[in-house]
Image: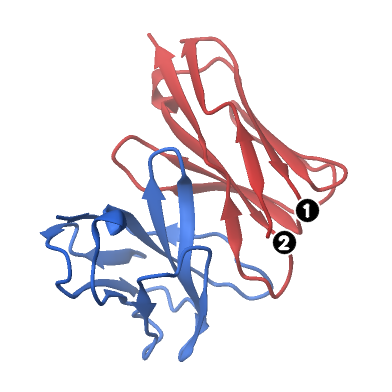
Chain colours: A blue, B red
Amino acid sequence: EAQVTQNPRYLITVTGKKLTVTCSQNMNHEYMSWYRQDPGLGLRQIYYSMNVEVTDKGDVPEGYKVSRKEKRNFPLILESPSPNQTSLYFCASSRGIFWTGELFFGEGSRLTVL
Amino acid sequence: GQQVMQIPQYQHVQEGEDFTTYCNSSTTLSNIQWYKQRPGGHPVFLIQLVKSGEVKKQKRLTFQFGEAKKNSSLHITATQTTDVGTYFCAGDSGAGSYQLTFGKGTKLSVIP
């Protein structure tokens, strides 16, 4: 089954404790992206990647890091989480040839930073 | 940067009434996509519009892309309780940008 898998789905952590949210897709997609969703603000792009070893900042990259060492994986790293990073996070992928194309979203990771 | 405005933010309708959400971009778009997110779920792709003035239908849903490729609308005829959710538009500014800018969404509630 074609899917985007995120882990963990739910996480409560404390300020400053490094964490990684993993994302994996099994569709051989070139393009992957991370979004955060906050009430009243919609979906905002954090980082995206066009291909292996190619990443770029989205609209709200501060406080986040990403890597794309393999085509299928695109982890989101919070080196020193802060309470303002409490949010619902979505990973998404697409074929992304000439433009972004249809995005396939993971089920989301709800992160709470205390 | 590119901005995509979506209105209304909320819409409550009686089951059987029609519903429309509108999307406006500050820049010309190469294409626009629409997504639906059910409560507690993740966004799911509905459709992509590419051509100026394009109209596409999916059963009770009608999608339009403006002539200037700066606005779009989603119209649902005779809403049902299964239509409940938040509808997002997402604008793509063009080949090579690879950045979809999402509107803030319209949350639809349907009263049975």
| Residue type pointed to by label 2 | Ser
Residue tagged by mark 1?
Answer: B27
Res A108 visible: no
| Residue type pointed to by label 1 | Thr
Residue A48: percent from left, percent from top: 49, 73
Q: CA distance from mark 1 to mark 2?
A: 7 Å
Residue B31: percent from left, percent from top: 72, 55
Residue extending farthest right: B67
Q: What chain letter is assigned to the residue under label 1? A: B
Residue tagged by mark 2?
Answer: B93
Residue B84: percent from left, percent from top: 41, 26
Q: Are marks 1 and 2 in contact (CB under 8 Å)?
A: yes
Instruction: Tell me which label, 1 or 2, sits earlier in the chain.
Output: 1
> Height in image: B45 above or below B82?
below
- Which quadrant of the rendered structure holds the C terminus of chain A? bottom left
> Height in image: B80 above or below B53?
above
Residue at 25%, 77% (x, y): give it. Answer: A79
How many C-alpha atoms fall within 10 Å of the one at disc 1: few (<14), some, or many (≥20)? Answer: some
> Which quarter of the figure has residue A61?
bottom left
Mark number, residue A104: none
Residue A39: percent from left, percent from top: 38, 39
Residue at 41%, 73% (x, y): give it. Answer: A27
> Are the numbered discs 1 and 2 placed on the same chain, yes or no?
yes
Q: What chain letter is assigned to the residue under label 2? A: B
